Amino acid sequence: MAIVTQSSKLGNVLWPTLAWVVALIFFFPIFWLVFTSFKTDADAVKPEFLFFFTPTLENYTNMTENYDYWRFAINSVITSTFATLFALAVGVPAAYAMAFDPSRRTKDILMWMLSTKMLPAAAVLYPMTFLTKNFLGIFDTHFLIILVLCLINLPIVIWMLFTYFKEIPKEIIEAGKMDGVSLWGEIKDILIPLAWGGIVSTALLTFIFCWNEAYWTVRLTTIDAATLSKLIEGNRAPEGLFFGRLAAVSTAAIAPIIILGWFCQKQLVQGLTFGAVK
Amino acid sequence: MSNRTLPRLLQAPAILLLLIWMLVPLSMTLYFSFIRYVLNSTIRPEWMTPALSNWRGLGNYKYVLEAKDFWFAIQNSVFIVSSILILTVVLGLGIAVLINRSFPGRGIVRVLLISPFFVMPAVNAVLWINMILDPVLGLNGLAVAGINEIVDGLRDFPVLGGFFSMWPEFEPISFRATQTSSYAVIMMVTWQWTPFAVLIFMTSLQSEDESQKEAATLDGASPWSKFINLTVPHLARPIAIVVMIQSIFHLSLYAEIEIVSRGNGNKNLPYLIGEFTSNNIGAASATGIFAVILANIIAIFLLRIVGKSLMD
């Protein structure tokens, strides 16, 4: 969109430059985090080493010793991966039925599913703690975190899959039915290959949401199933003594997800706005 | 097997799971909100277990409505959420228009801009409050110290020195303090969510009807009037969606508030619920019900917009 007329030479230099400046400002905090992670804890708080210092990898090599990083990271990987897979396993059949066999109530069901996503988590904090601790005995287990992450993302998963599946011509699925293909065959051999791109982006986005979740993963765990969110929150105020190592562990916690995020910007819009912005 | 049985069976697991997830904890909250339920009650030990005999009616609601913290939390939530909304929408619009053109390195600019959105909330808060906003060791403190040093140096100059010696020593703002901790939260969340607004506005700008704008150009419309009369109405729906989705997310901010000041001077409803939960479950549940009502009011409007675009 041209705010300036096309003949304006000045505008052709000015606006892109401004765009670059804005982008660099927005990226700066992340850059600063990564930059700080290469300073020793002592250097990180000395003004004279603000920009020029001897880079070191010790914060990364000591990450296990300082924070037991890998334990939390593995928990994050396990819970996010399985939550994503379960959400897909439940979501694909549901979205398939809604997209190719809609009933009068399909729209209401979809809307209702979304509305569960909008319930404030804090409102059920005590019942969840009570149920899982005293009643079911699954507090601080991988199983619980996987279940919760799966449930809070299920509406988005079904919603996204539904919009992808709707793009597939009904006739293709119908043709499969005529040929007497079983339901499982229909899903496995026709639907999944055709909607593969959509399913993969749904999975990536769900994984990102699971990884970054910071309410239930913190409140429903103590040690065994604690994820990276819990690790970082537990080290919230190091009073400047450990900026270097804290920056390193934070970088390690966000790097995989930022890189993953770059690959699914487009799907992000659809996933977060429930298809309402195209 | 009838025609409708199979689709129903396929949807059943999803619907059942979500139904249990929604109904069971929420009805417990509803129940607890009507009874006296206090975890450490030495005087009335019978209140320590949930029972119908501890019925309190609307007493917990009354108690919560009369609590100073509750109104502070509501006020503070509204302040935080509306500040973030205004900032993200204005910045988001500006940036989306700015990068909605082709220029060298546009792809990289997009990648840099979107990145903050993927930072996990806990890292976002830890990074901002320590490495950027800390009044002594963060960039905030270092920058203010740097300015003071420059001013100090200028004081020795003839003539001009007289002017600069009237300047006070600058004090860096501490963002962990009672009055300022909400600003820190607003800053970090705005940083994280502006990319979201940019992304949505940009998606929507790309579907704008270009021929309409060309016609307006031929009629001699100024760029500004084209923006106000064509682009802004086109963006009305995305703006509404950005506002509502963010409201729902930011009403339940937690990690940032916890990390910045542990709620000191900066509570919202989820934080208040968390505090009540350590002892007074009745009050926590009543507060929870208020939070649900508040979220529902926004959700109804959001769902209406989403519903309209669902079936086309």
Image (spheres, coloured by chain):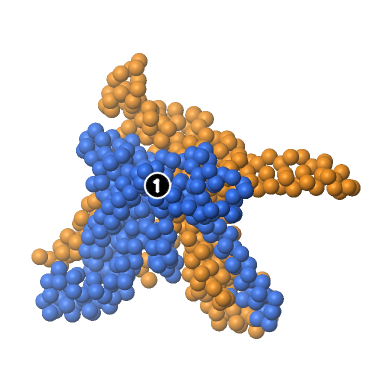
Chain colours: A blue, B orange
Quarter occupied by the N terminus of chain B: bottom left
In the picture as drawn, the residue positioned furthest to the top comes out as: B43
Kindly identify which residue carries mark 1: A62
| B213 w.r.t. B293: above or below | below
Residue in the picture at 12% in, 71% down? A182
| B261 w.r.t. A270: above or below | above
Residue in the picture at 56% in, 76% down? B104
The image shows residue B79 at horizontal and vertical percentages of: 56, 44
Which image quarter: residue A3? bottom right
| B59 w.r.t. B169: above or below | above
Quarter occupied by the C terminus of chain B: bottom left
Can residue B201 be seen from the camera position used here?
yes
The image shows residue B187 at horizontal and vertical percentages of: 56, 49
The image shows residue A207 at horizontal and vertical percentages of: 33, 58
Q: Nearer the viewer, residue B96 or A119?
A: B96
Looking at the image, residue B107 sits to the left or right of residue A212; the answer is right
Describe the element under mark 1 as helix, strand or loop. Answer: loop
| B259 w.r.t. A11: above or below | above
Residue in the picture at 31% in, 71% down? A197
- Amino acid tagged 1: Asn
Q: Nearer the viewer, residue B220 or A50?
A: A50
Can residue A148 be seen from the camera position used here?
no
Q: Chain of mark 1?
A: A
Crowd rating for badge 1 (residues with CA inside 10 Å; few <14, some 14–19, many 20+): some
